Amino acid sequence: MQKAALLFTLLLLSHFSFTQKKHESFVGKLVYSIEIMDTSLREMIPNKKMVIYTNDTLLRIENRTDQLGDQVIVKHLGLDKSYLLIATPFSNYAIQTDHSTEEKDSYPYTYKKKCGTKKILGMKAKRLMVSHANFKEPMEFLYLKKYSTKYVNTLENFPGLPVKYYISSIDGTYKYELISIEYITPEKDLFGIPSDYKRVSFTQFLEEIMQMQGDAPK
């Protein structure tokens, strides 16, 4: 009787450990291509790239927008806090955000897992059919099961690192696809805040920009 109870306990612990298996840490560099899905807009909105560096504690995301130019986000994954680095004609700013205090809107993406895999950069990526209010029909996303979704800083509650996915925006729907992955140790300086950047809250940033625009010569 005792042996049977012990065997049952070991099986239960084994099952619990399997179901609670965590993602592997990723340290390195990810590069995604970004493409607007509406072909009529591609001449006005050219393809772009998003570059991500991480040491599994800190995250640096390099991007470019038509409105604000080059942007860099430096985020502490454990503390859920970030700085958005923006250079303006008036000054350079590091806009602080504490994501842990933000009100969470209802999550706009829902998904269903799909059988089979597809290759991305020689790696087997699993499939999801993802729905969003702005998608005409569910879109196929691809992800790597062994890494966490936290490194893309966009999609929450996904079962792994998205390597092909779609983001809805004011301009339309953009496709993001992983085109490069490097297993390197990023330089520490990549995650620092440059000394010539002023640390402000988002409210302070807006107030200063509005004031400086008002003071600018007409």
Image (cartoon, grey):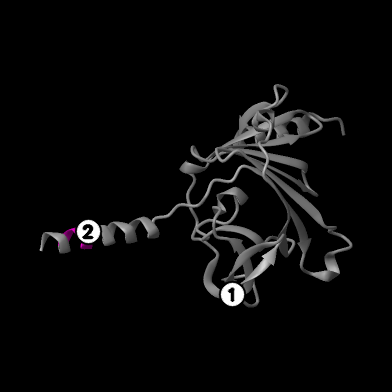
Is-magenta flag for residue 141?
Answer: no
For disc 2, the neighbor class at 10 Å (few under 14, some 14 to 19, many from 20) is few
Residue plotted at (55% across, 65% down): 109
Magenta: main secondary structure equals helix
Q: Position of residue 152 (x, y in %)?
A: 62, 51
Q: Nearer the viewer, residue 130 or 123?
A: 123
Please give the label number shown on residue 175: none
Residue that label 2 marks: 9
In this rendering, would 167 be left or right of 69? left
The correct choice, above or below, for 214 with respect to 176 in the image is above
Q: Amino acid at mark 1?
A: Gly
* Real-space Cα separation, disc 1 to disc 2, in angstroms: 34 Å
Is-magenta flag for residue 6?
Answer: yes
Q: Earlier in the sequence, mark 1 or mark 2?
A: 2
Q: Position of residue 29 (x, y in %)?
A: 69, 44
Q: Nearer the viewer, residue 73 or 55?
A: 55
Q: Position of residue 11 (x, y in %)?
A: 28, 62
Quadrant location of the C terminus in the rendered image: top right
Please give the label number shown on residue 116: 1
In this rendering, would 165 be left or right of 56? right
Residue plotted at (70% across, 61% down): 122
Quadrant location of the N terminus in the rendered image: bottom left
Q: Is residue 166 visible?
A: no
Which segment did they paint magenta? 5-9
Residue plotted at (50% across, 56% down): 105
